[in-house]
Amino acid sequence: MNKAITTKPRGSAAPVREDDAKIQWVDLLRRGFPLIFLVTLIVIFTIMSPRFLSLDNLSSVLDEGTVLLVTALGMTFIIMAGSIDISVGAIVAVSALVAAVTVNTLGVLAIIPAVAVGALCGSVNGLLLAVGKVPSFIATLGTMVVYRGLVLYFTRGAPVSIDNDLFLNTYSGITFGIPNSVMIGLALAAVAWAVINFTVFGREVRAIGGGERVSILTGISVTRVKILMYVLLGGLCGVAGLLQGARTMAATSQLGLGLELDAIAAVVVGGTPLTGGLGSIVGTLLGVLIITLLSSGMNMAGVDPYLQNIIKGVVLIVAVFINIDRKKIGIIK
């Protein structure tokens, strides 16, 4: 009898150890996926085009990726909380238009109304979700159409030029060989990193993504946090719109088209699962580099532009497949 008692635990201990090892391996893959993928892209595109790692190309890539970075920083908070926002491209267009209209009067300070309008658009999204109880995808799908429609209405499809030299030099110039937009983007990334890791708001966003009902029971004001995180995203879209307008020297109705897909892809590829509860700004930075280098590398390699969207879509699917936490989803619908 004693033998039977001692052999049973021994026989049942092995599967537990195997399960633990499997979980550890999957977690390691999730954490290392962005860096592994980034290095793989760099190696592949460097072999295909030696000019890929040139300083001029890397500087251009960083400059091009700044708008995506600033938008993705705000999207990190949204996805980490288990929500989504597909209106960011339209908010960027609205903010760029406001900057273009006010730049001749305010100059460099046109950033104030641009960010304010972006935050206002974000607050509408947050109110629809948190107070109106409209699912985030549906709410932002509707506001995306509204915001894009507003830009089309006021511009009539014509570009609004930006020709204020001080404004352009400040937001799209170069200082010590580094684009000003890149410095602005990295400064905002540092602030976002500090907010996520060292503030109550950052912990609350993570907690809501981990379990909204539990967050309510622990005393977190979920409504307040949801509204604030959408306001934050809207404000960052305001900065992104300003930078994009300065870069193109005009605000157009087509500005920001497709940016929502790239922003979501950058955040998810960077290791933030759509199920929420996890995420990091460092991961988002890697994700932005991956998406930007992927586009730049495919252009330099001469990949068909119509094929590039297919490749981006495959990358997003693979990233979601690897990063999704299936333990938090009982039924996949």
Image (tube, rainbow, N blue to C red):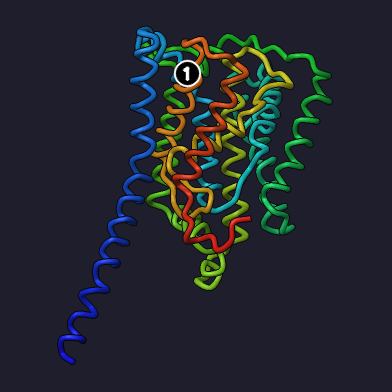
SS at circle 1: helix
The quadrant in which residue 58 appears is top left
Q: Residue at 33% of width from left, 20% of height from top?
A: 43
- Quadrant in which residue 48 is drawn: top left
Residue at the left extreme?
3
The correct choice, above or below, for 235 with respect to 179 in the image is below
Give the total of numbered labels: 1
Residue 307 placement (x, y as % from top left): 59, 20
Relative depth, front residue between 290 and 190: 290
Residue 73 position within the rendered picture, expressed as x and y whole percent measured from the top left: 50, 38
* Residue at screen point 42% across, 53% down: 199
Quarter holding residue 156: top right
Q: Examine the rendering and report whether any part of residue 124 can be seen.
A: no
- Tell me where residue 256 appears, x and y as whole percent: 65, 26
Q: Amino acid at mark 1?
A: Asp
- The quadrant of the image that shows the N terminus is bottom left
Residue at x 44% of width, y 41% of height: 192
Q: Which residue is mark 1?
A: 63
Pick whichever, 161 or 216, lies toward us: 216
- Taking the image as shown, residue 140 lies to the left or right of residue 207, namely right
